[in-house]
Image (cartoon, rainbow, N blue to C red):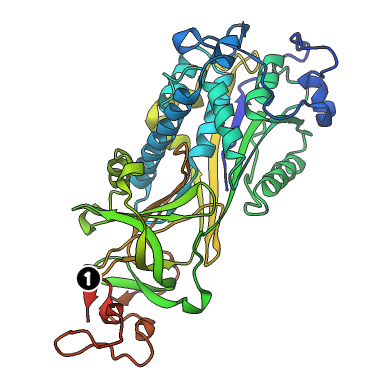
C-alpha cells in the first residue's frame, strides 16, 4: 500500500463571503457541495460522463474550459493507456534516482502508481505553467484524454488484486470550486470530507481513513497539519498477491544475504528446489519474474557488483527492454528468496523540486481548485511490504541470482524489484533491498547458517573431484552458484 497526501496551505485566509457557484448537473444528482454534508449521495465511482479541457490533439485534459467529453468517449484510449504505463515507469526511475541521491545506503519502497494518481489529480486543478510542469514531471504531457485514460487504468486495476481509493479533506468555509469536486469524483473516484478545524481530531480522521484504505497496513500517514491547511488530497493503494507457486514454509531457514564481497547478514530465506521460473541474464544483471495468481508479477533484478550503488541506472536499462518478449519460457529452477518486511517514508518535496516542480511549493497556479493564493506545503509518501511463503501484501521485493551449473536464482544480494500489472505494464510498487535485516549483526561472507540442509538426505556435500554421486541431484553440490 502507499499514500500521497498533498497539503495545500493558503498564504492568507480566503474571504468567507465568496460562495461556490454550482455547475449545472443533471436533476436528481447532488452537487459535490451537498455531498460534503451527505457523502452517501455521491454518484458511483468512475461514471462515464463528464467535462474537461482540450489537451493534446484538441481533446479534453483539464478544467480550464467547459468542453464536452464526446471526443474522449468516442476515442480508443488504448494508446493513451500505453503511454501512461510508460510514463509511470519513467517516473519510477526518476524518483528512485532522486531517493538514491539522498540516501543510497538503505532499502526503498514506493508506489509509482499512487504518486502518479495523486499528482495527476492535483494537475486537474492546476493551470498554465503549474499544470505544464506537473504533466512534464509525470511524463504525461503528451497523453491525450489523460484523466479519462487514468480512469480507464484504475477501472482495469480494480479487476486485479489491487484496490485504489482517494479522499479530499477540505477546510470548512473555503469555496472549493464545484467543477473540481465533480471532476475529482468522476475521474478519480474521490469523495470530499470536511475538516473540523480541530487539528488533533482532523489528524485522527485522516489517519483512520488511510488505515482503512490500506487494510490496516499504514496506521499513521501524517503526524501534523499546518495551521493554515485548506485541503489534504489523499490517494491509497493496497495490493495482495498470492504466488502462483507457493513456497514451502518447512524449507525456510536462516541463510546469508551477501551485502557485498566481504560481509553478509543472516536472514530467513525461502527456498524451493523446482520452482517454475522465467529468467534471463546479461553481462551486467539478471532478471527473473515470479508470477502471482492473476495478471501480476514480482520482477527481481540482480545487478553485478559495480552497478549495485546505482539501482536507478539498472532499472532504466531493464525497462528499455521489451520484457514481454525478453522473458523466456519458465523452467524448473532452484530459488532462494528472503522473507521481507519493509516500511518506508519519503518526503517528496525535495525530489519533486529537483524534477522541476519547485514552483509547486512556492507560487503555483491552482485556481481551478479555489480562488486565492494556494501553495503545496507537503507531499509525503509511505509504503509497507510483507513478503512470505504464501505471497505479498501491499508491495514486494525480490532478487534473482543464477547458478552457472544449473538453473538457480537466489535473492541473497542487494536487488531492485517491481510489482507489475502484466497486461498494461503498470508499475504498482517499486523498491530496493540492500539489507533485508538492518538490525542483524554483520558476519563475514562464508558458510551459510542453513547450508547444511542444502542437500538431499543421505547425500554427501561433495566429492574430491566434484563429480556427481549416483541418485543425488546436482544441486546437492551447489551453493551460491559455485561447486563446493
Q: Nearer the viewer, residue 120 or 247?
A: 247
Picture quadrant where residue 441 is located:
bottom left
* Residue 457 in view, yes or no: yes
> In the picture shown, does residue 115 fall above or below 18?
below
> In the picture shown, does residue 31 fall above or below 398?
above
Give coordinates of residue 55: x percent, y percent.
Answer: 49, 12
* Residue 308 in view, yes or no: no
Instruction: Report the residue marked by disc 1.
Output: 405
Q: Is residue 245 left or right of residue 22?
A: left
The residue positioned farthest toward the bottom in the image shown: 458
Q: Quadrant of the C terminus?
A: bottom left
Give coordinates of residue 113: x percent, y percent.
Answer: 51, 38
The residue positioned farthest toward the front in the image shown: 471
The residue positioned farthest toward the left in the image shown: 465
Picture quadrant where residue 440 is located:
bottom left
Give coordinates of residue 219: x percent, y percent.
Answer: 66, 52
Q: Nearer the viewer, residue 375 or 448?
A: 448
Q: Is residue 18 left or right of residue 102?
A: right
Query: SS of the residue at dot 1?
Result: loop
Q: Nearer the viewer, residue 452 or 213?
A: 452
**Total of numbered circles in the picture?**
1
Mark 1 packing: few (<14 Cα in 10 Å), some, or many (20+)?
few
Picture quadrant where residue 376 is located:
top right
Give coordinates of residue 206: x percent, y percent.
Answer: 70, 41
Residue at 26% x, 81% y: name it: 477
Amino acid at each position: 500500500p502507499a499514500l500521497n497526501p498533498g497539503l495545500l496551505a493558503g498564504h492568507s485566509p480566503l474571504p468567507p463571503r465568496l460562495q461556490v457557484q454550482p455547475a449545472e448537473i443533471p436533476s436528481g444528482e447532488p452537487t459535490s457541495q451537498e455531498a460534503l454534508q451527505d457523502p452517501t449521495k455521491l454518484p458511483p465511482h468512475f461514471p462515464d460522463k463528464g467535462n474537461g479541457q482540450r489537451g493534446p490533439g484538441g481533446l479534453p485534459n483539464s478544467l480550464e474550459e467547459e468542453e464536452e467529453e464526446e471526443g474522449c468517449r468516442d476515442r480508443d484510449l488504448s494508446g493513451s493507456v500505453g503511454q501512461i504505463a510508460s510514463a509511470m515507469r519513467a517516473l519510477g526511475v526518476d524518483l528512485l534516482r532522486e531517493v538514491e541521491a539522498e540516501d543510497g545506503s538503505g532499502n526503498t519502497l514506493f508506489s509509482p502508481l499512487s504518486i502518479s494518481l495523486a499528482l495527476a489529480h492535483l494537475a486537474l486543478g492546476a493551470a498554465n505553467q503549474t499544470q505544464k510542469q506537473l504533466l512534464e514531471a509525470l511524463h504525461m504531457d503528451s497523453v491525450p484524454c489523460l484523466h479519462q485514460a487514468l480512469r480507464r487504468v484504475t477501472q482495469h486495476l480494480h479487476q486485479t488484486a489491487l484496490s485504489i481509493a482517494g479522499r479530499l479533506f477540505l477546510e470548512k468555509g473555503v469555496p472549493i470550486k464545484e467543477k473540481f469536486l465533480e471532476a475529482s469524483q468522476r475521474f478519480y473516484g474521490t469523495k470530499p470530507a470536511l475538516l473540523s478545524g480541530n487539528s488533533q481530531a482532523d489528524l485522527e480522521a485522516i489517519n483512520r481513513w488511510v488505515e482503512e484504505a490500506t487494510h490496516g497496513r499504514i496506521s499513521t500517514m501524517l503526524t501534523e497539519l499546518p495551521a493554515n491547511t485548506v485541503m489534504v488530497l489523499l490517494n491509497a493503494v493496497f495490493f495482495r498477491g498470492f504466488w502462483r507457486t507457493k513456497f514451502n514454509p518447512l524449507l525456510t531457514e536462516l541463510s546469508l544475504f551477501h551485502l557485498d564481497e566481504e560481509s553478509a547478514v543472516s536472514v530467513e530465506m525461502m527456498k524451493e528446489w523446482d520452482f517454475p521460473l522465467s529468467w534471463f541474464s546479461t553481462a551486467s544483471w539478471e532478471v527473473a519474474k515470479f508470477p502471482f495468481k492473476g495478471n501480476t508479477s514480482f520482477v527481481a533484478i540482480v545487478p553485478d557488483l559495480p552497478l549495485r550503488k546505482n539501482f536507478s541506472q539498472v532499472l532504466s536499462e531493464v525497462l528499455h527492454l521489451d520484457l514481454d518478449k525478453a522473458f523466456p519460457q519458465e523452467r524448473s529452477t532452484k530459488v532462494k528468496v528472503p522473507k521481507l518486511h519493509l516500511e518506508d517514508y519519503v518526503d517528496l518535496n525535495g525530489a519533486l523540486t529537483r524534477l522541476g516542480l519547485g514552483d509547486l511549493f512556492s507560487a503555483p497556479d491552482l485556481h481551478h481548485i479555489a480562488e486565492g493564493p494556494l501553495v503545496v506545503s507537503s507531499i509525503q509518501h509511505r509504503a509497507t511490504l510483507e513478503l512470505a511463503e504464501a505471497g505479498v501484501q501491499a508491495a514486494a521485493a525480490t532478487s534473482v541470482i543464477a547458478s552457472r551449473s544449473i538453473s538457480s536464482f537466489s535473492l541473497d544480494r542487494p536487488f531492485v524489484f517491481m510489482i507489475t500489472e502484466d497486461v498494461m505494464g503498470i508499475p504498482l510498487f517499486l523498491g530496493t533491498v540492500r539489507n533485508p535485516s538492518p538490525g542483524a549483526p554483520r558476519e563475514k561472507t562464508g558458510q551459510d547458517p542453513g547450508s547444511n540442509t542444502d542437500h538431499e538426505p543421505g547425500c554427501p556435500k561433495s566429492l574430491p573431484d566434484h563429480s556427481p554421486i549416483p541418485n543425488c541431484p546436482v544441486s546437492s553440490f551447489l551453493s551460491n552458484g559455485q561447486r563446493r
